[in-house]
Every structure is written in C-alpha cells, then in structure tokens.
Image: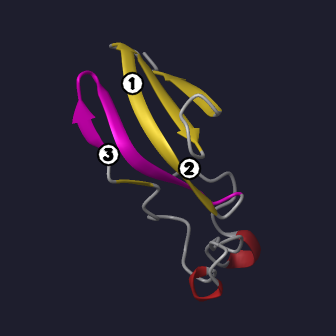
Amino acid sequence: MWLKNPNPNGKPATDKNNSEAQLRNRPLIGLKLLDGLEYEGGIWKDGEIYDPKTGKTYSCEIRLPSADILELRGYLGFSFVGKTVEWTRVK
C-alpha cells in the first residue's frame, strides 16, 4: 500500500477508520488489502478488498485485459453494482 504521509506526527499511520475498534491501532504499512481471490477462466474472483479510507471490506475481482492493464472491481452484493479501478503498468 502506498501512503502519501506514512508517518503523520512522527508515528506510523494506523487503520483509524476500521469498524472494529480493536483493529484501529494497527499500522497501514504492510496491511493485507486483498484476500481470497481464486483464478477462474481469466478472472481472479470471489475475493475481498479492504479500503482503509472507509474502513470497509468489499467483494472484488481482478482482470488483466492486456499485459499492461489491471482492472480491479470492488462491489457490494452483485458485481454490476460497484466501482472499477484501472491500473496501467509504468514503462
């Protein structure tokens, strides 16, 4: 995970928005954001992604439409109701 300011006030940034109070003091650096993805027919699916900005976990799937593009879709319930983020490989 990349953070613009990983050490605000000289201390590591923490998971302060987590809905579970006991997890709010864990550092964001090194935090596992993706979990449970399984490869099936060109798509990694049935996984979860954690969003530390909101403290929420969403279902997710990942596609590689080309060698230089990765699409990650996060959603609640059905995959057609969600948000897709596209990452492009830096050359």
- Drawn side of residue 38 relative to residue 47, left or right: left
Q: What element does badge 1 sit on?
A: strand
- Drawn side of residue 45 relative to residue 33, left or right: left
Residue found 35% across the figure and 38% down from its top: 45
Looking at the rendered structure, the kind of residue marked 2 is: Trp
Name the residue furthest bottom: 22
Residue found 43% across the figure and 36% down from its top: 61
Name the residue furthest front: 78
- Drawn side of residue 78 relative to residue 4, left or right: left
Looking at the rendered structure, the kind of residue marked 3 is: Leu
Where is residue 46, by image quadrant? top left
Which colour assignment does the render follow? secondary structure
Q: In the figure, 2 relative to 15: above or below? A: above
Residue extent of the magenta highlight: 37-53
Residue that carries the numbered disc 1 in the rendered image: 63
- Which of the marked residues, 3 or 2, is nearer the chain's N terminus? 2
Residue found 73% across the figure and 70% down from its top: 8
